[in-house]
Image (cartoon, helix red, strand yellow):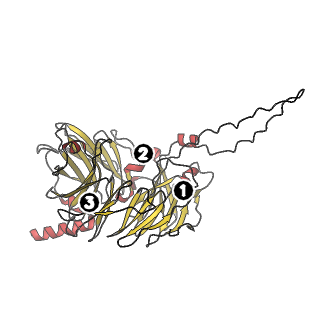
Amino acid sequence: MKGLVITACLVAAALGGGAYWMSLRPKPSGTLFDDHASAFTVLASGSGQLITFQDTQTPLRAFRWLPPLPGGVLAAQVLSQNDRQRVALFHDGAQDGLLVLKPVGVADGFWRSAALQAAAMVPGGTVLLLYQPGDPASAEPALALAVDVASQQVRWFCRGPFTRMAVAQGPDGAVYFYGGKSPIQRLALKAGGAGSLRPTPESIELGPDIPEVDDLLPTGADSFLVSHRNGLSVYRAGADWAQYPAPEADGPPCPGWKSSLVRDGKQVWWQPGPGKLLKVRPDGRPDALVQWTFRPEDPFALDAGLLRALGADSAGWIWFALATPAPPAPAAAPPNPPVEAEKGREAPAVAVAPAVPATDWGSYLAAGLDRLYRWNPNRGVLERVAMKQAWAVLNPPAPVQPPVLGRDVVPAAGTLLAEGAHCAWWLPLAALSLERVVQAKPAPAAHAQAQAM
């Protein structure tokens, strides 16, 4: 019987990255740090679940929710005043609590305020945790841990100047740590777990045209795509980087814009700028450029040039929030040079060309950008929901605030998160009622600039 249970757990982990395994575990008893009462309550609320931290006996140093994880998992970090780190994991109403111990060699000061920035479930019942220094001015490197959920033991850890991670699933998968101008770190994930107890990371130097990494998408066990402000780069082990330039920008400048990569099933898309999406061939070459044009009478017609990809859901829809453009600076009046008048005559008037009408971005921004879109590439359908109106219809519980669309809506997880004081409302994206946008979308055109450099 024991052998059958172990086999079932391994199969579940391989299929669902450990999420299904967690749903079979009994709900833990005790607070996050003792065994007397439950630290969290999970209650049905409207279309979702209201999760509340109610352990009033544990003085906290920090408490934070992570965006929902693929596989139907939600994670929260709880850091007590005595520097004990806990990570709570939720799945279909069940919860698990991980007591994460400080690895040997990690400074007490780092651990005391370490901020959990990302988590990922991987085969073998393992969760990957990525911590950043809690002090923004700290020069300490980030810390990545692989923790076995069943035994709550740290399998391995590594440190480096990275800020994000991406997981390539599969029997020969890997996890990539990256961020900014630093080299990319690759760690192999073994089929039976999350790598060896002492994995050796492979350091991959950035390509010559990559100023810094905006986004990274694994395409195989030892290949991946990198998007950056100069374009798209393709890496394959044993080969040189392939570089493809970005199309010229023709929309409003959006401060803080980062390019991104989206996987829609087997298809990969690259977004170099707002309102643009390029299909990527299996070899990494950009193939076709898609842009949207709304009807002029649409009150949100300018949204077409601001669409910012959030990711794709399991049904193949690509979801978008809106980038925030910078309002144009007020136009300065043209100088009026002095003209000397001839004796006995008035000085001639200087003709000033009329100002060219410009988009009133100030008024447009003042009306709000709280809209979500989803697009089906196969059907060519674009749908929209205005979150201000949708939020009221959802009848949210009183303690929570509307979600931050670019952070709390995770299409790959199929859910969104709305936070309150030590609580969160977790609900499926299917609870949103979207309406079709009547639009004219030009046929995709070949990206003429996508030539190898």
Of badges 1 and 3, nearer the viewer stands 3
In the drawing, what numbered circle is on residue 25? none
Say which element carries label 1. Answer: loop
Is label 2 in contact with label 3 (beta carbons under 8 Å)?
A: no
Name which residue lies at 23% across and 63% down.
Answer: 200
Name which residue lies at 18% across and 42% down.
Answer: 83
Q: Earlier in the sequence, mark 1 or mark 3?
A: 3
In the displayed orientation, state which residue is furthest to the right. Answer: 344
For disc 2, the marked residue is: 391
- The local crowd at label 2, few if under 14, some if 14 to 19, many if 20 or more residues have their Cα within 10 Å, is some
Is 364 on the left or on the right of 131, as rendered? right
Alpha carbon separation for disc pair 2 and 3: 30 Å
Quick check: 280 above or below 257? below
Alpha carbon separation for disc pair 1 and 3: 36 Å
Q: Nearer the viewer, residue 109 or 427?
A: 109
The reply to whether residue 284 is visible in this rendering is yes
> Looking at the picture, which amino acid does disc 2 mark?
Trp
In the displayed orientation, state which residue is furthest to the left. Answer: 1
In the displayed orientation, state which residue is furthest to the top. Answer: 344
Location of the N terminus by quadrant is: bottom left
Name the spot of residue 174 as percent of width and height, x first. 29, 66
For disc 1, the marked residue is: 437
> Looking at the picture, which amino acid does disc 3 mark?
Met
Say which element carries label 2. Answer: helix
Question: Toward which corner of the image does residue 212 lie, by quadrant?
Answer: bottom left
Alpha carbon separation for disc pair 2 and 1: 19 Å
> Looking at the picture, which amino acid does disc 1 mark?
Val
For disc 3, the marked residue is: 121
Of badges 2 and 3, nearer the viewer stands 3
Q: Earlier in the sequence, mark 2 or mark 3?
A: 3
